[in-house]
Image (spheres, rainbow, N blue to C red):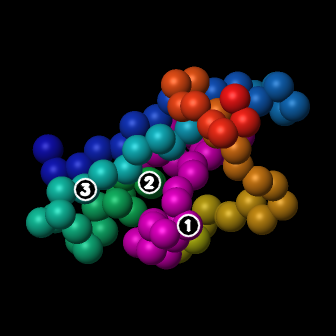
Amino acid sequence: MIGFTQLYPQFTSTRMKRSWLLNDLFVLEEHRERGISKQLIEIAKNLAAKTNAVGLLLETEKTNQVGNRLYPYTVFIMNETSNSYWWENYRKTESQ
């Protein structure tokens, strides 16, 4: 194995259809820059089409330079109109 992607099924209630969360995309360092990530994304897109899903969702850090170049290149559109928030169950914040 030189790489993998992990997908989770989701359901969008506003469209009443399945969608997929592309949670992980990984390629061993010695095999990078050979188009494997693009192939894995295409396989994920084919699964989405085969399952009649409305699309794929992914999120990456702003500092992920490779991913932030790769995803637009593979026709993912950045959502610039919303913020992403995360609540972590075990983290104590100053306001608690």
Q: Circle 1 sits on which residue?
A: 62
Report, in whole angstroms, how far the alpha carbon at label 1 lies from the one at label 2.
19 Å
Residue 18 colored in magenta in the image: no
Q: Earlier in the sequence, mark 1 or mark 2?
A: 2
Residue at 52%, 48% (x, y): give it. Answer: 45
The magenta segment is 43-71
Q: Circle 3 sits on which residue?
A: 27
Residue 51 can be seen, yes or no: no
Residue at 87%, 31% (x, y): give it. Answer: 14
Report, in whole angstroms, how far the alpha carbon at label 3 lies from the one at label 1.
19 Å
For disc 3, the neighbor class at 10 Å (few under 14, some 14 to 19, many from 20) is some
Splitting the image into 4 quarters, where does residue 91 fall?
Answer: top right
Residue at 18%, 57% (x, y): give it. Answer: 28
Please provide percent x and percent y for residue 17: 75, 28
Please provide percent x and percent y for residue 15: 84, 32
The mark lying in front, picked from 3 and 1, is: 1
**Residue type for callout 3:** Val
> Looking at this view, is 51 or 34 the one in front?
34
Residue at 14%, 44% (x, y): give it. Answer: 1
Report, in whole angstroms, how far the alpha carbon at label 2 lies from the one at label 3.
12 Å
Q: Is residue 50 above or below residue 68?
A: above
Q: In this view, does 55 lie above or below 36?
A: above
Please provide percent x and percent y for residue 87: 64, 33
**Residue type for callout 1:** Lys
The mark lying in front, picked from 1 and 2, is: 1
Please provide percent x and percent y for residue 85: 70, 44
Q: CB atoms at circles 2 and 3 under 8 Å apart?
A: no
Q: Is residue 95 above or below residue 89?
A: below
**Residue type for callout 2:** Ile
Splitting the image into 4 quarters, where does residue 16 fall?
Answer: top right
Q: Circle 2 sits on which residue?
A: 41
Give the secondary structure at mark 3.
strand
